């Protein structure tokens, strides 16, 4: 019984470790990019890639914790659900930064963008719960 508990804990530690690694690489890359690169087209694209990696890596362990904490009577969802949710948040942050370049981003756009991504994730989770039970 104790071995089963330890064996089921390994994947979430791996997910947290991968999220930590992504976050460190992304934030360090952003630091060095902002500090030492002239802002041209290639550097701008690299900024968005590194921002996506940094935010997604930061959110993955938090999403894993929240999925465990608020699962209710359902089984614990697999680790890829937390990864997907972290990627949604990374997409949201990167899109908001992208919209900030032409100064188009405002609270209304940010709210409806977040709402649309949340609705997509809720529908995906409801479908997974009905099909697989987690």
Image (spheres, grey):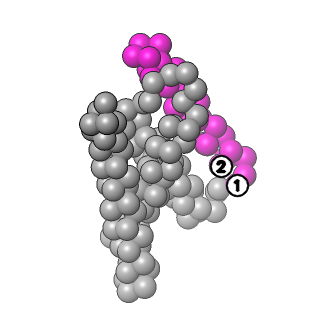
State the residue at coordinates (61%, 42%).
Answer: 113
Q: Residue furthest bottom?
A: 36
- Image quarter of the N terminus: top left
State the residue at coordinates (30%, 49%).
Answer: 14
For numbered disc 2, what is the local secondary structure? helix
- Image quarter of the C terminus: top left
Predominant SS along the magenta part: helix
Q: Disc 2 designates what residue?
A: 110
| Label 2 crowd (10 A; few <14 / some 14-19 / many >=20) | some
Taking the image as shown, residue 85 lies to the left or right of residue 49, namely right
> Which image quarter: residue 31?
bottom left
The answer to whether any part of residue 40 appears in the image is no
Vertical placement of residue 127 versus 9, above or below? above
Q: Position of residue 93 (x, y in %)?
A: 53, 55
State the residue at coordinates (39%, 43%).
Answer: 83
For numbered disc 1, what is the local secondary structure? loop
Q: Disc 1 designates what residue?
A: 106
Along the line of sight, which residue is nearer the eye, 91 or 74?
A: 74
Determine which of the numbered discs, if any, sits on residue 1 in the image: none
> Do callouts 1 and 2 mark residues in contact (Cβ within 8 Å)?
yes
Which residue range is magenta in the image? 106-134
Q: Position of residue 80 (x, y in %)?
A: 36, 37
Q: Position of residue 45 (x, y in %)?
A: 37, 64
> Which image quarter: residue 50?
bottom left
On whether residue 72 falls in the magenta region, the answer is no
């Amino acid at each position: 019984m104790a071995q089963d508990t330890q064996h089921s804990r390994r994947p979430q530690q791996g997910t947290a470790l991968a999220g930590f690694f992504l976050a460190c690489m992304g934030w360090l890359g952003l630091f060095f990019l902002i500090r030492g690169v002239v802002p041209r087209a290639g550097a701008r694209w690299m900024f968005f890639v590194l921002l996506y990696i940094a935010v997604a890596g930061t959110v993955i362990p938090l999403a894993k914790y929240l999925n465990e904490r608020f699962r209710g009577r359902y089984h614990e969802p697999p680790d890829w659900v937390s990864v997907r949710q972290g990627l949604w948040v990374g997409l949201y942050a990167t899109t908001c930064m992208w919209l900030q370049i032409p100064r188009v981003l405002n609270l209304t756009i940010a709210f409806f963008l977040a709402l649309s991504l949340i609705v997509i994730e809720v529908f995906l989770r409801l479908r997974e719960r009905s099909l697989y039970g987690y």
